[in-house]
Amino acid sequence: MIKALILDDEVNCIDTLSLILERKFGTEIRVVAKCTSIPQAMECMELYNPQVVFLDVEMPSGTGFDFLLNIGKHNFHVVFITAHESYALKAIKFNAIDYILKPINLNELEAAVKKIMQKLRTESIINVPEIGNLLDNLRNIKSDSKKVAITGAKQTIFAEIREIIRCEYDDTSTAVYLTDNRIFHSSKTLKDLDEMLSEYNCMRVNVSAIINISHVKAYINGTGGYAVMSDGSKVEISRRRKADFLESTSKM
């Protein structure tokens, strides 16, 4: 049976989540600890060694990230619980970690739990790289060395933003073109990638492509024109996005 720990400063939220888990997954998940503070949760981690932690983002005693920073070994999965959209939620999405918005939505919780249960059936937990990557990214909020989690059909890779040259969507997946002639096919939509990358010098230049402005080597003028990228590819710029593209490249 999977052991779970809940860390949330609101007792009613802990009780609600515990009740749902018991009713929906009572034969597969057992809540071994209900914690309202980070110090209490730290003690329970050592005592019970849970495989999954349901973690509130904002608490009076600190954040969920503070808790993770104080745990030496990330040999457990995390589902974040947050009351509102925030910078923290964007960071969580960026690193492909599951989250649930308060008030708890049963369908979202069920989807997150089933995903983790599937991982636990097929993988032995030695270290969960998504957590380490998240913490590294929070230390480098605006750096192009920040890594993004790119999810594919069979695996998730972590690529530095400066390694991403362009992303192009076809009928089945999004191809992410990286430096050193690497290509990774992601199950993320172009819209998902645009939301993650737009503030890191990347922009959508037409309905099916995102480019990293740092990798633009030349511009071929035209109605919209073409961006010549560092890998030698030419990416069409839509007429509607031409002005924004030229403004972005003028800052290089």
Image: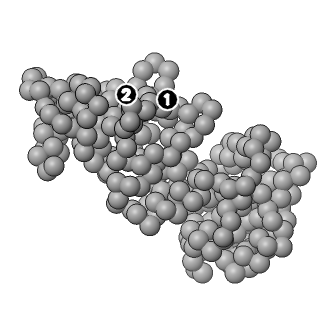
Looking at the image, residue 125 lies above or below residue 231:
below
- x, y percent for residue 90: 46, 54
Residue 193 position by quadrant? top left
Q: Identify which residue is drawn at 8% across, 26% down.
A: 221
Q: Identify which residue is drawn at 52% across, 58% down.
A: 134
- x, y percent for residue 71: 66, 71
Residue 231 seen in render: yes
Q: Can you name the residue that lies furthest to the front here? A: 180
Looking at the image, residue 245 lies above or below residue 208:
below
Q: Can you name the residue that lies furthest to the top here? A: 171
Circle nearer the N terminus (2, 1)? 2
Residue type at mark 1 is: His
Residue 81 position by quadrant? bottom right
- x, y percent for residue 222: 9, 23
Horizontal side of residue 42 vs 30, given as left or right: left
Q: Where is mark 2, residue-wise? A: 168
- x, y percent for residue 74: 67, 62
User: What's the colour scheme?
Assistant: one colour
